[in-house]
């Protein structure tokens, strides 16, 4: 950590700062430059970060040298992490997940119909929401436990691991009984108590990036989960807020190689929520494969105009079938493989 | 709601759309323009909003005419809402809250010292965090229930209503026993289950704007709380994410008159979190008064360089005393009053 | 265009509005809904757009139905535009441009060296800046006309068309004598007088997206150039401003298919300026191909640590050679071809 | 400047880096920390900034210690700058400018009518556009030189200094003959050739902040003008791009005290362009005074529904009259004065 002193600092302030640093148990090196004087503070960066050095009189700025995450970082764990998702499906290290399904679980028949179609097309994880975070209290909020049961049954019948969202620390135990992967949504990426609870389970967690989260924020939230005992964190890019309303969110594909440089965790891209536009989803799914994603997440509905949530952004099963074929072919070009389920 | 048809729509598609609209129980009016054909759909806008009209073939766009919130809107409730906060302090309709205190509760002596100083300066609500949302799992997470007890005792001794943050639906009952006002933080603005739980209490809720929330998003979250039974929602502007890192967040003061046009709810401005810089807090607090805010929220610490959370952005008690005097004088210019506590 | 009336409009206001609409030469249709009354205004959308309808008393909102660009739109020109860039290189309709070279032209030897290397690797357009837009008045501003001469000579010797930036309407004639393609930089995307001047030339224009420009803003700037006589506009995505400083800008790859749906113009992606990080450039270049880009623009320098501008974001020639090979192979997967120069 | 080495740097790389630094004529200090090794580079920060240190192998990051602007900085010039605008009107150091007038000059009668009304209300600078930057090539582009003549005549008749926008380096001489203050618009904030040209005049320049410009970017553009000889730069905040479309732009009032800490230059706030909404302009104008602005810039039109540009955001003369009175009163509270014209 580097402390930059104000141009007009007093020697008394300098002495006070140095004393403070020593009181906290750190060492320092003083460097008097042409225009600014610096103090290089030497010690565990994590402890330094929590010390309010910037509040001391005479300090102009405090520059951090290290990233604040550790367990999620590639410095700490050099190899790509690979996780088992169920039914032989792996993610990471060359294995790709192809996650598909409707936004919300609406009933057993319709989910089974969609599940069969996406499986036939090559999807290897089934998604569906039972508890739905909706901006409006007047929108459909999901079927709850009833939905979880349907998801489990359809997953078993079609032999696909399933993923569903958990919104509340109180739901973790319940949802854990039914699902193979726990999803934490974008709006809950910094719901720290929820992160702690999913950190106590032994299920992989699909952690979606918040709408205004930096790459570092996302990795800090992953750090929360790992620090509470669960190493199986799968990151997910699903678009961030921007000034251009022509797409629902702004897909940040550069974050894929950016994250892969910083972290060993696998990363999935969700072009459905990122764009909100079926006409853009296929090319963004393919671009995500080229960018190095470890998985693609697509919403599919057999009748979008009847869907109870986010219908307009779902692909039709035949559109998904065509896209899945292209994803599989492109994955091979990049020496990756979309695993098949039994 | 207005449906815009694609330039090359077929008459068959048009018929299908009209039939769908009638099936949903709505009426429509067809308008064939020079370049586009439109359908004005007539019916309850809330129900229309949930219908996936955009997913129907031949539809180019669906334009909304009404705002999606109702209980929070000024159309629904014309007069400014006024809430009682305790010890005779009101907010709204000309009464201003001046909320001050440390970021985190660190112990009884230090909180009492700060509370006495901010009260003497004119603050009428005491703030302090017992459960702290921290980006890093390695940062100080707050004293928990121990902190709540300290807050309650200090509030009683100094005769000030108190406000503290609730981060988890499981904490609502506990915190409700100790506090006068429940705060929902920026990161939890769309933690819908938490909104529902605070919506079931009878305490005023200080709802902070999320870092990438639009004004409408904030009002939709207020709508959640009101729809679950609690009308006492106090909105809070605390800055949004921007591309300029010279301030911690970007304070959006235009949202004050913007919200007051749309809603009857009182609104507080928090320049401490918005700027993260003590040198900018005083002028932003005064600008907030001029913008029409119903309250100002300031972090104060008697020794920022020892603070366990957000020290660098806290004002010193003597800085706060000077600012509080200016706020009170400026409030009078705008025919408002900062209530005094007993 | 649709006029939404305020909930409490008076019949007198309505009459005034209708009269205004008729005075402007438009027709209207009145639609009294359950909660709002609407007026569908029928006429040329372009003329309507310039009428200040929103300033009339009683009007709550004015909703636009059509896009404000015409010559740049695919509705107006259904086929992909294809432009000749020189030496047999085409862009658009399956032909890809691979534009490479240093940020700034620093001298004849170094440019020739880089040009030979990028040509050998497969680049088909040579880039280099002679007039440089620099944030600081104290940074290297380019070699000016001397640089243009060097660029022309090196382009002729290596038989590659060349592109260089024009920053000032007064430079257009001069630069036009030396270059094959005129580049308008991100900071000048809404320098309308410059757009008009390049619109009067007969050279293709590489128009870079502004840092806070929407897709529509970019297409409006293209419209300026086309409306002044030059149909050969090549769009370029080079990242937009965002809140995450871990990359220089935020690459918006969804804008590629988004633009291709709205417009017939070819579009190039520049991952060098978008990310500012050599470690992210290769995967973003490949993702751009998968997203449907008609060209890729990469900065290459044989000694980045000596470069006079933007050295840290340049690829080394051997890194470029490897990437160019991957781009060419991936282009084939998408039925596209990077043309070779003689 | 501080160089952070990669965790796995080699001693050979370190030697190469140190040699490079010495070749460039700088000194360094080596600091081997627990987790990272640093090099403090000592020398003129401006020269250091132009050296591509980050491109050297083994370098992880380069941290800047100083701000890159000098002539515009308060370190360089401690006192507030005060400029004469004409007819005895000053800006800076307690003197406030109240700039008002229509967006575009439409004719002599209408401008004279508006000018008389805003002067009577207390405005001391008249604004009006003769050359208009318009997003669409099909919108009204201004009256050109004809408009300048009208502006000059009306300014002389009403004894107010006048300000008008210059969009093109070729227009600077012409516009300089007619106006008292040259305005550089938001879209041209980084049109560096235009900045250089206005830097050669002796007229005050009103420099508007670009839509995605940081505070530092704005000060760097001011630096350009000053470095070319013209010290009279007046900064202007007019809102930046954000994700919330409920206002035209996002007014950043914290930049007022932020700029005043960094720079000696006066700063004006333009709530008309920032919000685009007449209902929000008055409170944002007053908040700007409270934030410490040296001037307020308001668009006024006597018949917004007939205005040829930006009618819907203009105040009516009677609305302006009321607001001007409040601005003058509030200025006094903050020990400032809106100068009167003869």
Image (spheres, coloured by chain):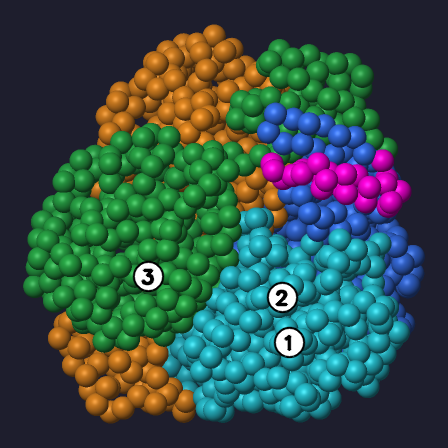
Chain colours: A cyan, B blue, C green, D orange
* Residue placed most toward the observer, C49 or D237: C49
* Residue placed most toward the observer, A24 or C121: C121
Is the residue under label 2 in contact with that under label 1 (CB below 8 Å)?
yes
Chain where mark 3 sits: C
From which residue to which does the magenta span run?
Answer: B1-27
Residue at left offset 88%, top offset 55%: B227
The residue that mark 3 highlights is C337
On residue C83, the disc is: none
Residue at left offset 15%, top offset 59%: C342
SS class, disc 2: helix
Residue at left offset 12%, top offset 50%: C152
Q: Is residue B223 above or below residue B6?
A: below
Quadrant in which residue B170 is drawn: bottom right
As measured in the structure, the alpha-carbon distance from the residue carrying label 1 to the one carrying label 2 is 9 Å
**In the rendered structure, does residue D38 fall within the stretch colored magenta?**
no
Q: Is residue B341 left or right of residue A193?
A: right
SS class, disc 1: loop
């Amino acid at each position: 950590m580097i402390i930059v002193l104000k141009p007009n600092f007093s020697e008394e302030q300098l002495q006070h700062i140095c004393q403070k640093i020593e009181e906290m148990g750190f060492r320092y090196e003083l460097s008097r430059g042409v225009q600014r004087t610096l103090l290089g503070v030497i010690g565990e960066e994590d402890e330094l970060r929590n010390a309010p050095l910037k509040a001391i009189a005479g300090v102009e700025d405090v520059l951090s040298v290290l990233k604040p995450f550790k367990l999620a970082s590639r410095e700490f764990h050099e190899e790509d992490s690979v996780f088992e998702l169920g039914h032989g499906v792996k993610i990471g290290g060359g294995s790709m997940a192809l996650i598909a399904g409707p936004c919300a679980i609406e009933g057993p028949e319709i989910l089974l119909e969609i599940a069969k179609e996406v499986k036939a097309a090559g999807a290897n994880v089934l998604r569906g929401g039972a508890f739905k975070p909706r901006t409006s209290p007047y929108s459909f909020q999901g079927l709850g436990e009833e939905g979880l049961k349907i998801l489990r049954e359809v997953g078993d019948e079609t032999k696909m691991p399933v993923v569903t969202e958990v919104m509340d620390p109180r739901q973790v135990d319940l949802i854990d009984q039914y699902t193979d992967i726990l999803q934490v949504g974008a709006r809950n990426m910094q719901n720290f108590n929820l992160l702690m609870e999913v950190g106590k389970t032994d299920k992989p967690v699909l952690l979606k990036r918040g709408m205004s989260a930096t790459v570092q924020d996302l990795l800090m939230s992953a750090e929360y989960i790992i620090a509470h005992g669960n190493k199986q964190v799968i990151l997910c890019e699903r678009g961030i807020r921007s000034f251009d309303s022509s797409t629902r969110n702004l897909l940040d594909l550069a974050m894929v190689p950016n994250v892969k440089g910083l972290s060993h965790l696998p990363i999935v891209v969700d072009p459905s929520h990122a764009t909100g536009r079926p006409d853009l989803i296929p090319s963004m799914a393919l671009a995500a494969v080229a960018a190095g994603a470890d998985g693609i997440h697509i919403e599919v509905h057999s009748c979008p105009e009847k869907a109870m949530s986010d219908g307009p952004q779902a692909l039709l099963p035949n559109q998904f079938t065509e896209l899945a074929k292209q994803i599989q072919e492109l994955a091979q070009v990049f020496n990756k493989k979309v695993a098949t389920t039994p």
